[in-house]
Image (cartoon, rainbow, N blue to C red):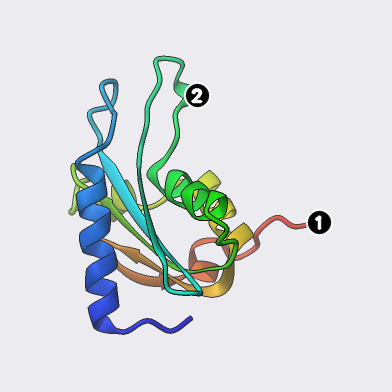
């Protein structure tokens, strides 16, 4: 799915807004995400932590789960904003490996991944050899 500059800006703005809803009392690292389905609907998510750290949810997976539970299983792009990431270390702004794999489940390998403060990537650049059965 090709997206224009205006839609990119809108997705990043929605990701930023979603990050303000993050529940992150342990890491104090709010993250927001916005995904767009191939039919044009936008879904947002934020990270939701838990004192049992492995039970927490990343913003990207929350947004994707919202899309899927709303009937959208084909996604065209995702935008991510880590409000407190370190811009001088872009790796602190990137989606984790689990999120990249979940993205690949619902997005084509050439789908756009927009990372606030870093740039635009094809999903295949971030996960070149995704797991599949």
Q: What residue is drawn where x is 52% and y is 54%?
A: 70
Assign the C terminus to one quadrant of the image. bottom right
What residue is at 20 percent from the left and 51 percent from the top? 17
Seen from the viewer's position, the closer of residues 24 and 21 is 21
Mark 1 crowd level (few <14, some 14–19, many ≥20, 10 Å Cα)? few
Residue reaching furthest right?
133
Q: Does the image show residue 118?
A: no
Q: Is residue 1 visible?
A: yes
User: Residue 97: x, y in percent?
Assistant: 52, 47
- How many numbered markers are drawn? 2
Position of residue 57 relative to residue 89, above or below, is above
112 versus 83 height, above or below = below
The one nearer the camera, 92 or 16, is 16
Work out whether mark 2 precedes mark 1 in sequence or the reverse, and give the earlier one. 2
Circles 2 and 1: CB distance less than 8 Å?
A: no
- Distance CA(mark 2)–CA(mark 1): 26 Å
Q: Which residue is mark 2?
A: 55
Q: Which mark is residue 133?
A: 1
Residue 94: where, in percent of width, then height?
36, 53
- Give neighbour class at mark 2: few <14, some 14-19, many 20+ (Cα, 10 Å): few
x 44%, y 28%: residue = 56
Residue in the picture at 56% in, 53% down: 68
Q: Quadrant of residue 118?
A: bottom left
Q: Secondary structure at mark 1?
A: loop
């Amino acid at each position: 799915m090709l997206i224009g500059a205006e839609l990119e800006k809108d997705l990043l703005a929605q990701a930023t807004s979603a990050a303000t809803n993050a529940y992150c009392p342990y890491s104090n690292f709010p993250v927001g995400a916005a995904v767009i389905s191939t039919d044009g609907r936008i879904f947002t998510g934020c990270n939701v932590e838990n004192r049992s750290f492995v039970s927490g949810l990343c913003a990207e997976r929350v947004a994707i789960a919202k899309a899927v539970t709303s009937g959208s299983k084909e996604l065209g792009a995702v935008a991510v904003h880590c409000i407190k990431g370190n811009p001088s270390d872009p790796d602190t702004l990137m989606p984790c490996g689990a999120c990249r794999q979940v993205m690949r489940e619902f997005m084509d390998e050439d789908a756009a991944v927009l990372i606030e403060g870093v740039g635009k990537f094809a999903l295949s650049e971030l996960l070149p050899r995704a797991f599949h059965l």
